[in-house]
Amino acid sequence: MQVYDYSSKTIVEIPSNQQKSLSFLYHTAVGRLLLKAMTRPWLSKIYGFYNHTWLSKWKIASFIRNHQIPMEDYKKEKYGSFNDFFIRTIRPEKRPISSSSRDFIACCDGKATLYPVTDDLLFSVKGSTYSVASILQNEALARRYEGGFCLVLRLSVDDYHRYCFFDSGTIKKSYAIPGRLHTVNPIAYSKFSVFSENSRVVSVLKTEHFGIVTQVEVGALMVGKVVNHPVQKFQRGQEKGYFEFGGSTIVLFIEKDQVSFSSSFFTYSNQMEIRVQMGMVLGQKRR
């Protein structure tokens, strides 16, 4: 698949080792029967338990090799399980945070897309139409984002799976919404409304520079759980939490007239996903 790499400002080809297996699961009758079991949270919990044990350590070396993980970017640690490796900590200098508080930064590594929210609180993703209220399960909160933006940051298994706060502020409210665990790969978008069906955690953030932003961490196929740190006040660049093994997604709802996104980010987002890294500047506070 092709993505626009935001750091090099070039279009690059990203090999996907998962496409064949995902096509089987989502586009064949036998695959869909298997999918019914695989998308149940209890199965992910069992698999997550295994990944926390020393028995899973054998997977680490092949995972690094198959996904070409640059281990020199990460702190040297001893991993007691595959999950210890998966939630490894990156060296701070590899994810610098802009010193300007007016800069709107990426809160995680991933493939980003930006969608305008219509007056009737809808936005379209790869042929699927989503309601802001259906994702947040809160009609009053959803109305805040009329005419604003929805920023989707999709993490694949080779991405850094810790995420930070993009601004300083306080958490006004946080709640979990149970659901299934479909893959967040675009191959599933045409079959399921993954952002409103998957298990997710919603945080309403009162930020110092970008208004009320609602951040949604969406669990995905084989993600045992979303782990958020128990904080109320937070600082820009502070770690908010991490995803355990699997692909996953962060969805940000941004109020109207709060952020001006860079022209290249806005242009390429209409054509393809944009590869970004945590701390990258995506836009500025709107004057």
Image (cartoon, rainbow, N blue to C red):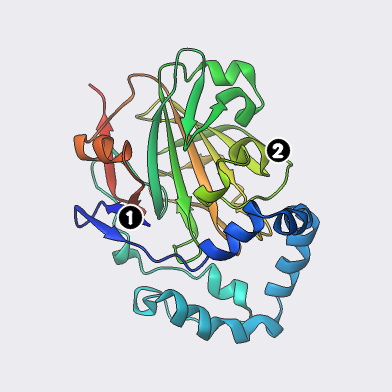
Name the spot of residue 132 as percent of width and height, x first: 56, 25
Q: Earlier in the sequence, mark 2 or mark 1?
A: 1
- Residue in the foreground of this view, choosing between 266 and 192: 192
Using residue 155 as the reference point, say whether residue 266 is left or right of it: left
Q: Tell me which amino acid carries mark 2.
A: Ile
Please, is residue 66 above or below residue 93 in the view?
Answer: below
Q: Which residue is mark 2?
A: 177
Q: Tell me which amino acid carries mark 1.
A: Gln
Q: Which residue is mark 1?
A: 2
Residue at 71 percent of width and 84 percent of height: 55
Using residue 106 as the reference point, say whether residue 283 is left or right of it: left
Please name which of the two marks, 2 or 1, marks the residue nearer to the observer: 1
Q: Residue 222's mark?
A: none
Give the Cα separation between the discs numbered 2 and 1: 32 Å
Q: How busy is the neighbourhood of tag 2: few (under 14 within 10 Å), some, or many (20 plus)?
A: some
**Residue 240 in view of the camera:** yes
Q: How busy is the neighbourhood of tag 1: few (under 14 within 10 Å), some, or many (20 plus)?
A: few
Residue 96 lies in what quarter of the image?
Answer: bottom left
Q: Residue furthest front?
A: 29
**Quadrant the N terminus occupies:** bottom left
- Residue in the foreground of this view, choosing between 191 and 146: 191
Please, is residue 172 above or below residue 218 in the view?
Answer: above
Residue at 40 percent of width and 31 percent of height: 115
Using residue 141 as the reference point, say whether residue 273 is left or right of it: left
Residue 102 lies in what quarter of the image?
Answer: top left
Residue at 62 percent of width and 84 percent of height: 57
Identify the element where label 1 is drawn.
strand
- Residue in the foreground of this view, choosing between 286 and 276: 276
Identify the element where label 2 is drawn.
strand
